[in-house]
Amino acid sequence: MLYDIQQIRADFPILSRTVYGKSLVYFDNGATTQKPRQVVEAITDEYYNTNANVHRGVHFLSQQATELHEASRETVRKFINARSTNEIVFTRGTTESINLFVSSFGEEFMQEGDEVIVSVMEHHSNIVPWQLLAAKRGIAIKVIPMNNRGELLMDEYRRLFSERTKVVSVTHVSNVLGTVNPVRELIDYAHSQGVPVLIDGAQSIPHMPVDVQQLDADFYVFSAHKIYGPTGVGVLYGKEEWLDKLPPYQGGGEMIQHVSFEKTTFNELPFKFEAGTPDYIGTTGLAKALDYVSSIGMENIAAYEHELTQYALRRLKEIPGMCIFGEAQERGSVISFLVGDIHHFDMGTLLDRLGIAVRTGHHCAQPLMIRLGIEGTVRASFGLYNTKEEVDVLVSGIERVRKMFL
Ligand code: PMP
């Protein structure tokens, strides 16, 4: 299939705007992605024509809204190749998915002295919920170290297991280093020890085909807004046999079967974990976004972004004083860097004046910054609509900033 970049860019109206009189170069896709017309129009259309609360009404609109919402669940199921829609829980995003998991799994399966294994390159959202559980329950957090290229040390990983290891929770792709972790290998080893694994897919779902059955992940979480969908909605995938065993996370409407003051029974999967009115408009937007990337093809997106990232790495390395953090063999389309002793914040602010949106700071991964011995980086992260010409604009922008600091 021909990757029609001009057509793709035309689907994202925001890409043709200017900032400070310069053409926008949007390289902050790791934080959030822009939305194609198809997604925005589907959201508008539902508000205009089909809006009603789901799962409740006998009336026409409510039934139509419910059908749309449940069709979106099926779209997600198909996209990640889950066995059943019972395994697709809608949440507010990756962060809520992880908090739900930690809270429910911790309550049911973890006692004082039990252990979770995470990696040194986790986002705060896969660290702090475990720390909250540690404060409540006295569990211990063990950390997989990495080498200087940003690759996890697999021997060390295996050595971290003990009889107290109850769960492994690791990111698929680092939002700072771009490292694609060998999750299948991590999962296989954990399973050989009888331990389930949660994969944080926030940075993998937009960039590569993901098949949860092939990965054999017990849980996989992601946010819609990082894959060209709306904010405020996300997914917790869990194997049905696991979700069945977990207690509800929040109480309220939708998640119950029958309520009395004496005894309440809970709804079946996946509704047991979906208290309150769901973001049914958001799930429509998410499904449209998944349809959109599927129409281009995740393999095609992965190949296009790989070539773009390789080009960017080559060009950036030509800049004197360039230091790139993350040189893993397997890497995604995130590039973190510093140039000489120019502060990341100065670099980001000056690039912004040239119309280039990059991220600066610790990227919600302060333990990783400590490991790297730095305070923060500049991060350029690419999406399916970015181009080599935009990379050239970034490279000449960095050159300009560098010369100002000479
Ligand atoms: N994990 C990773 C690896 C991320 O990159 C992010 C977002 N930067 C998150 C979790 C949190 O995602 P959200 O803010 O959408 O909940």
Image (tube, grey):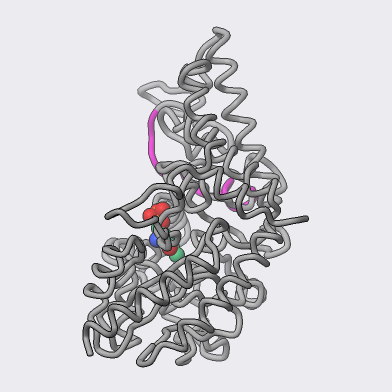
Instruction: Tell me the chief SS of the magenta region.
Output: loop
Residue 265 seen in this snapshot: no
Residue 2, position in %: x, y? 74, 56
Residue 366, position in %: x, y? 30, 75
Q: Is 73 above or below relative to 14?
A: above
**Quadrant, the C terminus:** bottom left
**Quadrant, the N terminus:** bottom right
Q: Is 204 above or below relative to 278?
A: below
Residue 252 seen in this snapshot: yes
* Farthest residue, direction right: 1
Q: Is residue 229 left or right of residue 31?
A: right
Based on the picture, tell me whether residue 243 belongs to the magenta stretch. yes
Residue located 59% across and 61% down the image: 207
Question: Could you say which is closer to the camera, residue 299 or residue 105?
Answer: 299
* Farthest residue, direction front: 21
Question: Could you say which is closer to the camera, residue 20 or residue 85?
Answer: 20
Q: Quadrant of residue 344?
A: bottom left
Residue 26, position in %: x, y? 42, 58
Residue located 54% across and 7% down the image: 59
Residue 229, position in %: x, y? 50, 44
Q: Is 212 above or below relative to 315?
A: above
* Farthest residue, direction top: 59
Q: Which residues are magenta?
A: 240-252
Question: Could you say which is closer to the camera, residue 74 or residue 89?
Answer: 74
Residue located 38% across and 88% down the image: 322
Indicate the quadrant of ligand 1 in the picture: bottom left
Looking at the rendered structure, the number of numbered marks drawn on it comes to 0
Based on the picture, tell me whether residue 82 belongs to the magenta stretch. no
Q: Is residue 405 left or right of residue 354?
A: left
